[in-house]
Image (spheres, rainbow, N blue to C red):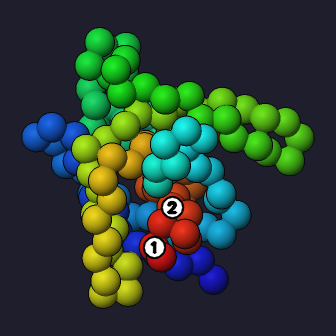
Amino acid sequence: SAKCATVTLAVDEKQVTLEAIVDSGNSLTDAFGMSEVIISDNKTANRLLGDLQSNACHSRYRALPCGTVSSVDILDGYRLEHATITFENRQKQLEKPILAVSKVALQDCEAIINPKTLE
């Protein structure tokens, strides 16, 4: 069964807290900075970052190659200031994680995190 965690994402003065699923099938990482990657959808990105076309967002932008069964796709990613993951009564702080924006709405949760993020 899937494990659940709570993740709080922070940018400037804004914070968004999401229910996250810990997905061992998610191995998405930032190819360059090796930052932790948290996957969510457009709604979360807009709540946290506002206008994704703005200059402020442009400076945070990272393209994240992501392999699927049939192809390689590029997800839009945005560097955040920090995130806090709460999992099984433990908290972990992430510095400068990347929010990857899923192209499809997430069904059973608001975010997906890689189990390695919790190590």
Q: Residue at x 72, y 32 (%)?
A: 73
In the figure, residue 61 lies in which quadrant?
A: top left
For disc 1, the marked residue is 118
- Does 75 sit above or below residue 105? above
- Does 114 sit above or below residue 78? below
Q: Is residue 9 left or right of residue 116?
A: left
For disc 2, the marked residue is 113
Q: Quadrant of the N terminus?
A: bottom right
In the figure, residue 105 lies in which quadrant?
A: top right
- Does 103 sit above or below residue 92? above
Residue 102 seen from this side: no
Farthest residue to the bottom: give it.
Answer: 89
Q: Is residue 71 left or right of residue 60?
A: right
Farthest residue to the left: give it.
Answer: 13
x and y percentages locating residue 13 in the rendered image: 10, 40
Amino acid under label 1? Leu
Residue 30 seen from this side: yes
Mark 2 / mark 1, whichever is N-terminal: 2
Q: CA distance from mark 2 to mark 1?
A: 9 Å
In the figure, residue 80 lies in which quadrant?
A: top left
Q: Residue at x 30, y 13 (%)?
A: 54
Amino acid under label 2? Ile
Residue closer to the observer: 32 or 106: 32
Q: Residue at x 39, y 64 (%)?
A: 19
Q: Residues within 10 Å of mark 1 (few under 14, many from 20)?
A: some
